[in-house]
């Protein structure tokens, strides 16, 4: 399943990047995503690892993730190393009318036919969580200005 | 009469003995778990509406002994819920074993449970798993606690079993108490039937100390430790702060003291959970 949420932000890309490129900051501002450093003190960048869990259902779901793309100030993406397979991408692009487009993409895929059924059932909950995450990131960026 | 019943039970035990397989740690299959976890978790979540708090109290790595109260007869919801919840939270890569009665492992769902990391409740299995750095969940109350009458739902009754504490002290492993409420509402448990089990000699032949009597689906009045279709009772679970036994009780801990403290702490939590519960089954 693939979920995409996109909204404009009243801030330039650099300012958006400063907030949303650090997984720990995203975790701190969100009530749907829990993020912990696996290597305390390490800076976000390709290869940095975190524990990322999405609060959906009675137990947070996720696993250990590693940043696989870190292109300032455009893209930050991670993929899972352990736990429930997923990918997350944060995409920052200039907006012609001014400001920035901020996009969150979240893809997850459980193995097998029964896994697909579970993915379909969980889709509305995960979609709502990702949209909530995007709104919270934008609130934080605009509040920091 | 007693001789006849005893012969019947002995015959039954003999007939089953060749099929009794203890299971071992190698049966756990993370790839199989990864495939079934999403859908099984979905069904369990929809059926029991679990409310689980405190998974973050389980230490992030290393061996841990989770000690739970046992509920809900042979269909024990907390066994499945905790297994799936821990695998969902930590990932199937983190080894987690649950100790279960050999009858469970030899039931029709035994092969499935073995692949999910269930092994026979045996000190040697527990020690091996802890030595391998795994999380081990134990329900020391066993068949004594799991078949307690429904009106004793909010009572911790481990039955004085302390072997798990000796193991935790010996291995210097932290204990995380896990308290569950709701399982005893999945059927109407009337009696443990311990006298009947003794009369038939099942305690010595099949390690069964109970021959429970209950009203349940789909059979109505049911005798014996057979699975039932559980009512969709809301299950609440609380994991408490980890206990470092040597830190709290010194270099030579008194097992009886630890046992009393542990049971008291779990009972206090269960009583508070029961107070919050508004209606049976509904939660």
Image (cartoon, grey):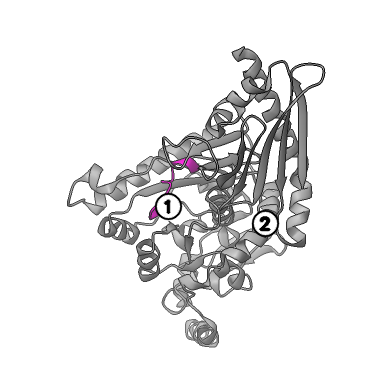
Q: Is residue B119 above or below residue A67?
A: below
- Would residue B83 be found to the left or right of residue B203 on screen? right
Which residue corresponds to the image point at 31% horizontal and 56% vertical from the top-left?
B168
Q: Is residue B250 above or below residue A96?
A: below
Q: Nearer the viewer, residue A59 or B162?
A: A59
Tell me where residue A136 appears, x and y as whole percent: 66, 24
- Would residue B118 be found to the left or right of residue B34 on screen? left
Chain holding disc 1: B
Mark 2 vs 1: CB contact within 8 A: no
Quadrant of the image containing the C terminus of chain A: top right
Tell me where residue A20 appears, x and y as whole percent: 61, 28
Taking the image as drawn, is residue A77 in sight?
yes
Looking at the image, the residue that sits furthest to the right is A97
Q: Is residue B210 above or below residue B21?
A: above
The residue identified by callout 2 is B40
Chain holding disc 2: B
The residue identified by callout 1 is B66
Label 2 sits on a secondary structure element that is helix
Which residue corresponds to the image point at 28% horizontal and 59% vertical from the top-left?
B171
Tell me where residue B211 appears, x and y as whole percent: 53, 68
Question: Disc number at residue A12?
Answer: none
Label 1 sits on a secondary structure element that is strand
Taking the image as drawn, is residue B231 in sight?
no
- Tell if the residue under mark 2 belongs to the same chain as the one under mark 1: yes
Query: How far is the residue under mark 2 from the one under mark 1?
Result: 22 Å
Provide the residue span drawn in magenta.
Answer: B55-67
């Amino acid at each position: 399943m693939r979920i995409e949420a996109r909204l404009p932000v009243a801030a330039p890309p650099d300012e958006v990047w400063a907030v949303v490129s650090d997984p720990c900051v995203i975790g701190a501002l969100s009530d749907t995503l829990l993020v912990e450093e696996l290597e305390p003190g390490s800076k976000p960048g390709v290869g940095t690892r975190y524990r990322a869990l999405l609060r959906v259902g009675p137990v947070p779901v996720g696993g250990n993730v590693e940043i696989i793309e870190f292109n300032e100030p455009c893209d930050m993406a991670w993929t899972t190393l352990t736990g429930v397979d997923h990918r997350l991408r944060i995409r920052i692009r200039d907006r012609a009318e001014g400001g920035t487009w901020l996009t969150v993409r979240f893809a997850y895929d459980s193995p097998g036919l029964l896994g697909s059924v579970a993915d379909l059932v969980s889709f509305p909950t995960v979609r709502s969580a990702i949209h909530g995450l995007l709104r919270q990131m934008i609130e934080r960026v605009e509040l920091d200005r | 009469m007693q001789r006849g019943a005893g012969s019947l039970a002995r015959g039954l035990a003999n007939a089953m003995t060749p099929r009794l397989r203890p299971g071992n740690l190698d049966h756990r299959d993370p790839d199989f778990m990864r495939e079934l976890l999403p859908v099984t978790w979905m069904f369990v979540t929809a059926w029991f509406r679990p409310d689980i708090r405190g998974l973050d109290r389980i230490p992030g790595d290393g061996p841990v002994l989770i000690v739970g109260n046992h509920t809900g007869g042979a269909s024990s919801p907390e066994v499945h819920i905790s297994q799936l919840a821990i695998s969902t939270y930590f990932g199937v890569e983190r080894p987690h074993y649950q100790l279960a009665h050999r009858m469970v492992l030899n039931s029709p769902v035994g092969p499935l449970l073995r692949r999910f990391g269930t092994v026979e409740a045996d000190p040697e299995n527990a020690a091996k798993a802890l030595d391998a750095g795994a999380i081990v969940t134990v329900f020391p109350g066993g068949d004594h606690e799991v078949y307690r009458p429904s009106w004793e739902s909010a009572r911790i009754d481990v039955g004085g079993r302390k072997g798990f504490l000796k193991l935790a002290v010996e291995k210097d492993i932290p204990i995380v108490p896990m308290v569950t409420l709701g399982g005893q509402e999945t059927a109407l448990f009337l009696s443990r039937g311990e006298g009947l089990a003794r009369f038939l000699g099942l305690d010595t032949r099949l390690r069964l100390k109970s021959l429970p009597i209950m009203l349940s689906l789909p059979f109505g009045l049911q005798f014996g430790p057979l699975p039932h279709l559980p009512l969709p009772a809301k299950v609440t679970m609380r994991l408490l702060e980890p206990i470092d036994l040597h830190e709290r009780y010194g270099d030579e801990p008194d097992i009886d003291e630890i046992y009393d403290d542990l049971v008291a702490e779990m009972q206090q939590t269960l009583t508070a959970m029961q107070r919050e519960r508004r209606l049976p089954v509904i939660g």
